[in-house]
Amino acid sequence: MARTKATEDASDKDDVVANGVVITNGSTNGTHANGTHTNGDAKDLAPEGSLSSFKPLYQGPKDKDKKWTWLDKEPADVVEAAENEETAQHALITRLQKANDSRKKYEMHSIIIQSPYLKQALGEILEGYPGVCCDLKRLVFEAPFEPFVHRWVEIEAFRARKDLDDITREHLELLYTVLKEELKDVIKAFEDYVVHGVITYEHAWTIFQPGQIIYSDSHHGAPSALKLRGGRYVKLQCGNAYQLTLEAIDWNGTHFGRSTERINVWEFIGTTKILGLAAFPMSFHPAKDKVEEILIKRGQKFEELAGCHYKEYKGFAITWDKDGNEVLTNVHGRIIVDSDTFKRFSPRFVNYIEPLEAKEGVSEPECAPKKFDIEDQSAEKYVFGKEQDSTKRLRLTKAHQFICGARVRGYSLKKKQWLLFYIDLVKDITFNDNAFESLVLLEDQKELILSFAESQAMNSSTFDDVISGKGRGHITLLSGPPGVGKTLTAESVSEHMHAPLYMMSAGDLGINPDQVEAKLTNILEMIAKWGAVLLLDECDVFLEARSTHDLERNKLVSIFLRVLEYYEGILFLTTNRLSNIDPAFQSRIHVSMSYPDLTTESRRHIWENFLRVLERETDFTAKDLDELSKVELNGRQIKNVLKSASLLSARRKEPLRRKYVDMVLKIESRRPGVAETF
């Protein structure tokens, strides 16, 4: 084929043209047959990602979709970096921005500390300040320079030291001069607020220094001390607030640790008293030394209540509404303090707490074991009348006790509710050790009941089933008419053993078989840990003989039988219909006692017992008691009559006498369906 001039020229450059594509040194400025790409510089490209190098791309203008474009060449209008070798010589760098304040042109955005002498000095001045590490090569503080404002007194004290070397003093004076000029308005305002005991919302942050102790009584009036982690301005649904993040010492059932709490200082106009805030630094409290003493003492009690404890309580406690908000409820009676069981069985979520390390605890006394472990005591069973051994548990320092929580988690046996109890209202129980002795029961029956109860409490029973753990509990069936002492028997046993009494009825379990099994299993697990005496009052629905007609009730009976088989505690069952009990229960009941109607002698004994424990002056003769014992009343009725008569005598400010009892009996006799007794 003839060669044209264009072809010759291309040949001179070792280039050829084929089908309109320029091929350089045998390669195309396009795509090879093997699929690799070339860039026209006479070099093949390396496989993707294989080169040990990087390629910078520079941010360009936004495209029509307002997305950033990226360029492979540096834009011409970009200025040189402000920080370089020349600026690195200076002890510190101040970065300025246009001021929003009309009184000045610029305001400081941030300060960069470069002097190693300054870093060392600030390491001492800001020691313990959260979020600050003065060992960093690039140490930056941004406006409003909270660490410097909070530690201004420490900065001035450090400046006054006589042992500073010349360079440190010179650099520190430089920083002090810069800060004083920038912060003079804030510091002056802060000092003015402190003198007058007031604060503005805008400058609320100035009095809250991270790491300091904060006083608050926001928990429904219970005073508390908490350690401040930090604060920030937030916008919430209820309005603007300066939100404090604080820590307290808590016990979650297995270990002590730090819990996190938040308190909001809501936005206000103008100034307000510092002591009127929802929380304020303890240093402002007029009686801070006395408050510290009281709170440390309460913290010691908090530490003592770690674990499982049977206590008395009278006053307000905390429950929750349907939205999860805390509300007050009045509680009067016996309670169980137990955070572990609260965590497992209550509907309330227990927040995570950061465990304390063993090195944070108090060093042990010389008589204590040398090994100091933090031990899980959640499975420890409560022993009647004996406190748990806490020698292996982490002991708290006074600093920890100072910021312990004001409340403990627990269970009200009377209300059957999981609640928060105020520590100051938790008291030791004064047991009635004569309760069992005053019980109207035959001596041999009383001895038999006590022998079972005491052996169960001491775990001294050697009897067991073929299957380990099966049939190790003790079940007593008490039958008879109302008011003859069935419930009182269980109450007296628990009082004699100094053990909790958990009273349960069919209504507490419901009638749905699945729910009954779940509730019963949980209850039995709870009271087994507490070492409680269980009383299932009026349990006929669970004991009644099964039939072929009522399958749902048959399920309830079967569930009840199966669950009780593995119960290891003391159980009292009471019924008014002994003849209807399912035969399967007969083999599971260890003692069955029938209570006949009260005799004249037993009624007299009951009158005497109630009058003895009545907390007011009484005036009854032996003749009065003889005559009253002939009135056919059961024990519960006698109690109610005396209660009403006592109210009558109290209103007239007189001792309780026979005439007031007669008045109540006469009124009762006029009740429809009741025969006149007097």
Image: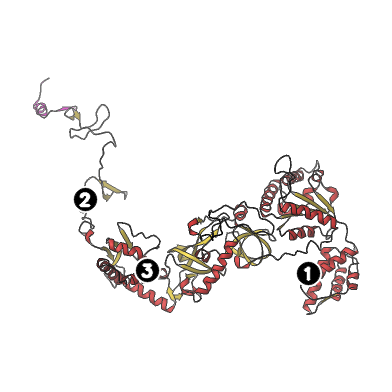
Instruction: Tell me how far mark 1 sits from mark 2, CA to CA.
Output: 96 Å
Location of residue 153 with respect to 368 vertically, above or below = below
Q: Which mark is residue 613?
A: 1
**Mark 3 crowd level (few <14, some 14–19, many ≥20, 10 Å Cα):** some
Say which amino acid is labelled 2.
Pro
User: Which one is in front, 146 or 300?
Assistant: 300
Reading the image, the residue beneath label 3 is 151
- Dividing the picture into quadrants, the one containing residue 42 is top left
Location of residue 201 with respect to 574 vertically, above or below = below
Residue 583, image x, y percentages: 82, 44
The residue positioned 47% from the left and 67% from the top of the image is 213
The residue positioned 72% from the left and 64% from the top of the image is 431
User: Which one is in front, 564 or 110?
Assistant: 564
Q: Which mark is residue 75?
A: 2
The mark that comes first in sequence, 2 or 3, is 2
Magenta-colored span: 1-19
Residue 565, image x, y percentages: 73, 45
Residue 557 shown in magenta? no
